[in-house]
Amino acid sequence: MESDINMKIGKLILSFILSLTLVLGLFAFQLSLFTHIKLYNSKMYMATYENSNIYSTITESINSELSTISRRCNLPKEIFTASFSDKWIKNELDNTTKNLIDFMTYKTDKLYIIDIKSQEAVISANISSFLQSSNLKVDDSVEIELNKVKSDALSMARNSISPINTKGIKNSSSFLKVRKNLNNLYIYKNHIIGFLAVVAILLLLLNLKKISQFVKWLGYSLIAGGLITFIPALIGLISKFTNNLTIRIPSIKALIAALLREYIVFFSQTGLVIFVAGLLLLIVASRLEKAHK
């Protein structure tokens, strides 16, 4: 009698451990799926940019900042604003995004440098033309100031597209660890699926004499695994925190907000699907128990 009780307790503890392992494995699987469907999917980013009108938003933000710079240095805003277009923004943002994905997945170790040379040439030509038409003399101090203004304008435009410090990324040990861990989730998706299958089989073998109990444990695992991502994602959607990001540059704020919404929706959807699957398994387990009474 005592040995039977000990066996039941032992089976219960082992089933709980296997169930908890499934929960953690399901969380890892969702993260792995996320890297494939969202995080490292360039098509998702391009679609998000188009649907959120990000290209035009960045162009407007750059031109607004350039107008501020022109007022500060008493130069016509047309000297700067005519240099940047939606087409150029799209090309540079798309290339930056694709390159960053390749960098994160170890397809390259070089980060894309935004090509600002044509804009620099146009701005320089516009400044020279304005000075000549205005018959303004330029001494060394004025030349230095004009070069600084031009440099500030180009840096602002570059940062509006990609605020990431490429040198800082390569030199950051913390970021490189994140890169490695995310890449492991990306490349080991099938291994995670295999691991989940092995754990589920072990749970089945442990409850082979009572299949309804196995189905119940599996259901609880799916419910918990789904809620881990569904609840935080739901809170994020309800709170609409992406609308209140404290980011100074409007274009970057719009870009990050749009991407975060895509990420949150993904986890809310996958979490809900897994949660519902768990509920269905509990219903199946309940009917199996009734059928054996």
Image (cartoon, rainbow, N blue to C red):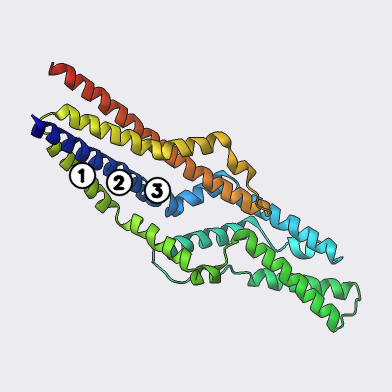
Q: Hey, what amino acid is under mark 2? A: Gly
Residue nearer the viewer, 34 or 85:
34
Earlier residue among tags 2 and 3: 2
Residue pointed to by mark 2: 25
Q: How many C-alpha atoms fall within 10 Å of the one at disc 3: few (<14), some, or many (≥20)?
A: some
Q: Nearer the viewer, residue 151 or 15?
A: 15
Mark 1: give few (<14), some (14-19) or many (20+) Cα within 10 Å: some
Q: Badge 2 local density, few (<14 within 10 Å), some, or many (20+)?
A: some
The dot on residue 3 is: none
Q: Position of residue 137 (x, y in %)?
A: 90, 80
In-image side of 178 versus 1 (left or right): right
**What kind of residue is marked 1?**
Val
> Residue 177, image x and y in percent?
42, 64
**Considering the numbered disc 3 on the image, is that residue within a helix, a strand or a loop?**
helix
The structure residue drawn at horizontal position 87% and vertical position 83%, both measured from the top left corner, is 139
* Residue in the image at 44% along x and 37% along y: 268
Residue identified by numbered label 1: 199
